[in-house]
Amino acid sequence: MKIISINAGSSSLKFSLFDMKDEHVIASGLFERIGIEGSNYTIKFNGEKITQEIELSTHVDAVNILLDKLTDLNIISSLDEIDGVGHRIVQGKDLFQESVIVTDEVMEKLEEIKGFAPLHNPANMLGIEAFRKVLPNVPMVAVFDTAFHQTMDKTTYLYPVPYSWYEDYGVRKYGAHGTSHRYITETVKKILGREAFRLISCHIGNGGSITAIKDGVCVDTSMGFTPLAGIMMGTRSGDIDPSVIPYVMEKEGKNASEVIDDLNKRSGLFGMSEYSSDMRDIVEQCDMQNEKCLVARQKYVRRIVDYIAQYYVLLGGADVIVFTAGVGENSVPVRREICEKLACLGVKIDLDLNNQRGEITKISTEDSSIAVYIIPTDEELMIARDTLHLIHR
Ligand code: ADP
């Protein structure tokens, strides 16, 4: 059983080809600058890496070349070996509570809601359309970043704003990174060997979100109507007072979307440090006593701790805290600082174990009140698993 997992952006297409017998990646790669000058692709397989500049006018071109290469390079012997293709979709609104097989009806619904994630959903749809054109007989599955969060209750997902905004325009919390938080939940289930546990999953990469999970089900998450809400991120502000927006619009002569763009792309670590959105750079600068970087890093940690504390209370305690994604999997000092601030809850980590990176590791001590793990996330595998599951069903 071979499944391709796809993450399509407006000018890119990322893929992983899995052999689902043992869930290993046979090949992976990226097509970049689709429709732009200088388009190219990279394919990794068998420890080799092939890169080529090639004209890619559309996503269909990228898919055609991808499939040609998979056979030319003998990664698969024929296209018949591909049993299904899973596609990441950023926003499924409340129309999609779980992954689905793509049909014309699903495509119509996606068309209906694409305005809710104008930068992402139309691009994700381009990927599906390209594969449907090139592989019309292979089942396609849509996997939604929002689906895992559909179990939040009304008190959680509604904002305290005029009710008609929700009824008329769909204004509510949808969350994101659901596929990652679901992968973490499944992994914790396997590690603990039980279904009932209170989990706080911290996906902290360039984007970041924290999710509270009870018995396998999401009860709250830090991202909101869009991924701009919640914790401080690489370039996103996370939660702020919305009154800042019209104030800055007036001061800088900008319109609302320009200020939202500042909050999405020029805030967070990048905005506060005036140096970098990358935690590695920030940590390096902190070692040199760069004042803005020091404050940015403290704020970043503080925001995460605030959410963990909030979810600890919401869940009535916690059994497990997981760190995942770029910063969560790799940053030894950030994990340490977060856990130090949780000492009042009885969290204790082993500083040697905390030096681990990139593999499943329990970093808490035996007498810690909450087990703390590093678990590398794998959204591509989750997409492939859903695809396999749905095509079997
Ligand atoms: P995305 O949200 O784009 O998927 P990732 O999960 O790949 O992002 O995380 C990328 C971020 O992870 C980088 O911007 C960087 O801040 C952080 N990161 C990666 N490696 C390290 C490291 N060794 N130490 C600290 N931070 C790291």
Image (cartoon, grey):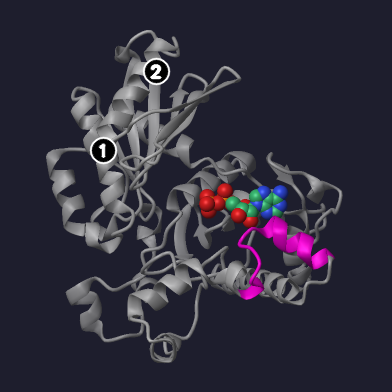
Residue at 52%, 21% (x, y): give it.
22
x then y, percent, for residue 177: 46, 54
Q: Is residue 196 left or right of residue 123?
A: right
Q: Is residue 68 left or right of residue 60?
A: right
Seen in the picture, residue 175 relative to 3 is either above or below; the reply is: below
Q: Disc 1, ligand 1: is the CB inside 8 Å?
A: no
* Position of the C terminus by quadrant: top left
How far apart marks 2 and 1 lie (CA) works out to 19 Å
The residue range painted magenta reads: 272-287
In the rendered image, which quarter is residue 331 located in? bottom right
x then y, percent, for residue 261: 41, 70
Return the mark for residue 69: 2
Which residue position is annotated with label 1? 128
Seen in the picture, residue 254 relative to 277 is either above or below; the reply is: below
Crowd class of label 1 (few under 14; some 14 to 19; many from 20; radius 10 Å)? many
Q: Is residue 299 left or right of residue 214?
A: right
As for residue 280 lying within the magenta part, the answer is yes
Residue at 66%, 72% (x, y): give it.
273
